[in-house]
Image (cartoon, grey):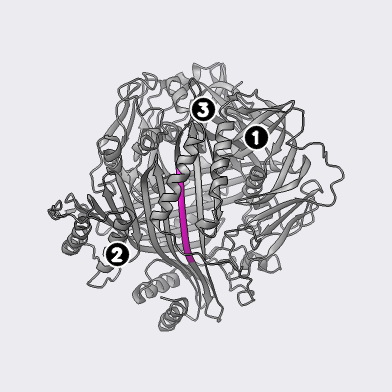
Amino acid sequence: MVSASIKSSEIRFGECNKKLLEEVIFYGISLGADFVELFIENSDNSNVLAEEDFITNVSPSFSKGAGIRIFKDKRDGFVSTNDLSKHGLMRSISQAIEMLNISKKTDILIFNGLKKLKDYSKSKIDWLNEVPTINEVSEKLLLSTKSLKKDKKVVVRKGSYARNWQEVIIASSDGTYATDIRLHQTVGLNIIANDAQYRSNGSRRFGSHGFPNEFRLWDHEKASNEVYESSMNMLYADYVQAGQMPVVLANKFGGVIFHEACGHLLETTQIERGTTPFSDKLNKKIAHESVTAIDEGLSEGSFGSLSIDDEGMEPEKSILIKDGILKKFLSDRAGELRTGHKRTGSGRRQNYSFAAASRMRNTYIAKGEFTKEELINSISDGLYCKSMGGGSVGATGQFNFAVEEGYLIKNGKLTKPVKGATLIGDAKEVMPKISMCGNDLELAPGFCGSVSGSVNVTVGQPHIKVDTITVGGR
Amino acid sequence: MNPTEITSQISTAANMLNIDKWDYGASFSNDYSVQVDRGAAKQLKASQKQVITLRVWNKDNLVGITTTSDLSETGIKKALKQANIASEFGNKNEFTDFSPLAKDPIQVKEVDKKNPLGIKKLLKILREAESKLIDSHEAIKSIPYNGLSESFYERIYANSDGAFRNYSKSQAAIYLYARAEEKDKKPRSSGSVKLGYGVEDIDIESCIKEAAKKTIAHLDYSSIKTDKYLICLSPEAFLTMMNAFSSIFNARSIIDGVSLSNKNSIGELISIPALNIYDDGLNDKNISSAPFDGEGTPTKKLSLINKGKLENFIHSESTAKIFNTIPTGHAGLGSKVSVSPDWLVIEKSNECSNLNTSLVHTNYQGEFVYIEELNAIHAGVRASQGSFSLPFEGWLYRNGEKRSIESATVAGDIKYLLKNIINIENEKELTTSGISPHVWINELSITGDE
């Protein structure tokens, strides 16, 4: 394990920080804060890029820092710093106190010291030593780009690997004191095929949390075949004709639409902002009765799983929607304080420079009873979205997603591939139109960017049918 | 630690590790920001950041890189060692070197350095702005996305060959995105962003007025029929489009095979002859200007499209070497160096006799779609294929009357778009991402709810 050499007056990762952390927290409380939280991070990351038959980029990076958050009533002040000395942390506390305009020191002691350290890192100490070396990564990435060289029409082949190792200490004035190690590995393949005026892209991303050996086990041949086939299928595709139509969305990354269009609206940050149409819909029907949706941080190895969230709470399995009825919102500490929804172990942040916010973890629509074929057979004229690209959701809940690989459905059968399709709608209107869920739930890793930065998540669903949606095209 | 001390520390550590050739880019910043929610402080934030990116060259002249926030002696040594290890995997197919222009004079804009206003003053200003915007119309219920920030930073580039340059500046920004709702109608949202060297420089009143005007204007909306329409792109929308497809003039993208251009494209007519595009990072109006790029190359004005023809590509040191030219000041810092444009300036060339000058968005009486702002660029643009399908905010104009469009996307192809420009209006407008006039396109596909 790599730990930076730190002077004695600075934070060290382990039990010996307790006294120092207590002093810093006590300092904040004594100056009048209602609540003080320290998030201290040491990270060691590495990125490798293979293009064609060469390694073209190897980029290690290291970072240390602290995020200090203070609450007074329902307000909060957040300061981040690279200075992990006692002096640096105290200075950040003072700055946060000043920001919140707290001038009255308190005589009432509301800090009883930190509890015994909850050490979630014990079984993970060797992870950093166990991950593949740059040499191993390079060799396997080059094998994967070589596997993509199946045809002279393939003009661009790329394989990328990223490893993020993060060691955290979380301490707060409610006594929370925990440490953890997180390890995320992700690998992506990208291809461009070209033939005269025709061009297509193909891409796939794979990822895991924990399991240092996971990249070594990654089946690069299978992944390369998937990307290649997708790209070739789309190379000569016509543009889709725009209009309203029924669609079947594939499993795995098809779940990105639920994540973006509905999942974000079930975060308490959206209630705080007044930007979710679901804020007053708890225990009311917001989706078709065939829809049950879950967010959890527990699935072993999944990209969005956690031992503890970034506020020191163990994650729970949150059933967001049960048979179409809204059952729960995802909440963090600020969300609980400001909206009353109990914390769900969903307080997450990209790193120490962001304050935690309520964020999704592994989010998916539960499996139903139908086969994929039954979904397709139920449509006479529509679109099958086999692979989704990126998308976005506006401030009013309208979403927009690119379809990377799509096929027309005619009389219950898949026909020709089509490109340029975009799915447009808003969650409130689309959720009641998800009328059939398949029995083939699968998950896929991704990155989610929002108020507290980019975090690792899993999206997922079985194949689902949406009765009608606007398909943008030409 | 000051820039000279850091350079000296790196030099000493490199000597100890027998590393003869190195360079680095560093950034130090202090940032302050506030957000409010209906009068209450929502989140107040301050950060002190330091980050340094080190590159080293090994005996085989292969480059390795490491980024760290640990500027202690130990931290720098560790970073140099890791960069040295990474250099063993340096790209043998494309050699990177110091920029030959890293010691050339740089042009630093004379701007008064601002002092921090502090969180309390930022909060007061943003509260007032939020209140004014909410009061501007009864349908505006909240300003869900808002922020006021000020940033003070210093950037450094230095190398083992004696190049050394640095600059420091301040920057401030405000954004206000309002949400408006009327009974039995869908909520609508729009907003405005303004930049300045300091908060005092920002025209906050105009930000409030613009956000209110845009949001209210979209309250009376209707759906649009899916069809092909005559299009007028606002300056902001046209700049967004050109930035999204900037791989057309990006040498790195060309080498990587993800551009619509190739090495021989210089001189090719890619748009109508009435179009000129420059990259002008040092433009007086560019608040975010930097006098040098990640490799220390001075920033300069560069003609990209002249009278419709591709005139120059943007380069890093290594792409310039491959194209047998000089770097243009558009590089990042890496073992594989990224290249990106700074600030585009778009204008009508003097070969504009074929334009239909009767098309002026303020008085044209025929039917057209006015695209004010394009959204979801990361999802809807396929730069390597040249295609786009993007949601937008805009209006349908008929007989001089305008109606906000409920929800729609515009789809097309950048090559078609550039060749089917039918007017470039005379008046240019300043935006946060560059300068451009309104640009008219003959016909693009719009998908609406009808």
Type of residue at label 1?
Answer: Ala
Q: Are marks 2 and 3 on the same chain?
A: yes
Amino acid on which disc 2 is placed? Arg
Query: Does residue B160 sit above or below A178 in this rendering?
Result: below
**How would you rate the neighbour count of disc 3 (Cα within 10 Å): few for under 14, some for 14-19, many for 20 or more?**
many
The quadrant in which the C terminus of chain B is found is top right
Q: Residues within 10 Å of mark 2 (few under 14, many from 20)?
A: some
Q: Give the chain of mark 1.
A: B
Whole-Å distance between the Cαs marked 3 and 1?
16 Å
Q: Nearer the viewer, residue A453 or B60?
A: A453
Judged from the image, the secondary structure of the residue bearing numbered disc 3 is strand
**Mark with earlier residue (2, 3):** 2
User: Residue B151 lies in magenta, yes or no?
Assistant: yes
Q: Which mark is residue A132?
A: none
The residue beneath circle 3 is A425
Circles 3 and 1: CB atoms closer than 8 Å: no
Q: Which residue is mark 2?
A: A91
> Element at badge 1?
strand
Residue B357, percent across and down? 82, 40
In front here: B206 or B311?
A: B206
What kind of element bears circle 2?
helix
State the CA–CA distance, disc 2 to disc 3: 48 Å
Q: Quadrant of residue B366?
A: top right
| Residue named by callout 1 | B411
Q: Which residues are magenta?
A: B145-153
